[in-house]
Amino acid sequence: MKLDHVLKSQQFSKQQLEKLFRRADKLERQFNSPHRRKLKNSLNGKLLFNVFYEPSTRTRMSFAAAAHHLGMNVVETENAKLFSSAIKGESLEDTVRVLNSYLPDVIVIRHHLDGEIEETAKISSCPIINAGDGQGQHPTQALLDLYTIWKEIGRLADIRVMICGDLAHGRTVRSLVYLLSKFANIEFVFFTPETPDIPGFFRMKQDLKEHLDENEIKYTEISSGFDEALPQCDVVYITRMQLERFEGQSVDYGSSSYAIDASRISRMKDSAILMHPLPRNTEIHTEVDTDPRSVYFKQAGYGMFVRMALLQFVLGR
Ligand code: NCD
């Protein structure tokens, strides 16, 4: 399977997702076997540029680690907003044009403007991977989220998923909903805290709801009844408030209205899983970290294998 740019969740077919997940699973097994060193031959000597204009721990490091494990070389810039020529007024398009001339095999970009990476990909002579664009999408996070559900629940159809937190400004939830909506009999519950001062401030954006309506996918939006909804779900996906995305606007949100503590996790089904893209703030208490349903650290770990598989497909292996 050969992929070109990786820009948004909608681009993946179910068949591609299945191939990708089988490959990630195989890579994980190979990585933990005596044949681990052979992986280095897979993309030996290929060059990855990691260009991050916004903060990142997991995405940047797991792409770099994935590349190293496959024998690639990595050149990166973090905080490119301040430390690259962006501060001198250079556009992403000009930057990528120049980077292309250093002959990388793939460029991974995180940028603060929605849609900017997709636009820039049009002029790039090598594949571009969107590692998060503003409040737009984060397709590789959604891939690892879906992989986690596939591994931990064992199926991608017939599941009820509750997604909670700041659904208006978070990009991971957008990409995840687009990806999950490809599968049969998926039902979403969107929980956002009440915001009496600016009603509906954290609610899922209209474009996504239109997508669900057009595809006749069931969803409900709630701002109360969280405890009653918990026992009904197979996946509980928690996100943080994206504070940096609404700086200066004073919004009163009850941060505890969906915080998972020991008493709340005990309401979840034994077979359900608790996910979070991380980083977390106070919306998942550390006391539930050891509960077998808490899979968020495992989820982050799966990210590296999914990104290894993705790099192989993008580079035609
Ligand atoms: C997310 C992001 O950058 O959108 N982080 C990540 O890549 N795991 C989630 C977040 O910042 O809340």
Image: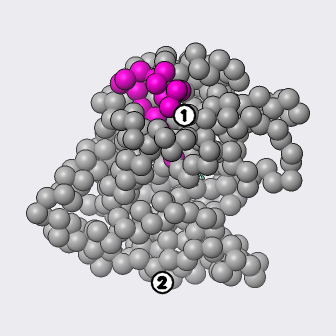
Q: Position of residue 40 (x, y in %)?
A: 22, 71
- Relative to 302, say whether 193 is above or below: above
96 lies left or right of 16: right
Closer to the N terminus: mark 2 or mark 1?
2
Whether residue 225 appears in magenta in the rendering, the answer is: no
* Viewer-proximal residue among 4 and 22: 22
Return the residue at label 2.
102
Q: Hey, which residue is sitting farthest left in the picture?
A: 34
Q: Position of residue 48 (x, y in %)?
A: 42, 73
Give the residue type at disc 1.
Answer: Asp
36 lies left or right of 120: left
Whether residue 273 appears in magenta in the rendering, the answer is: yes
> Which stretch did the figure color magenta?
262-277
Foreground: disc 2 or disc 1: 1
- Relative to 282, say whether 220 is above or below: above
Q: Are marks 2 and 1 in contact (CB under 8 Å)?
A: no
Q: Position of residue 4 (x, y in %)?
A: 43, 57
Q: Give the residue at x 41% y 21%.
A: 269
Q: Position of residue 104 (x, y in %)?
A: 43, 76
Return the residue at label 1.
261
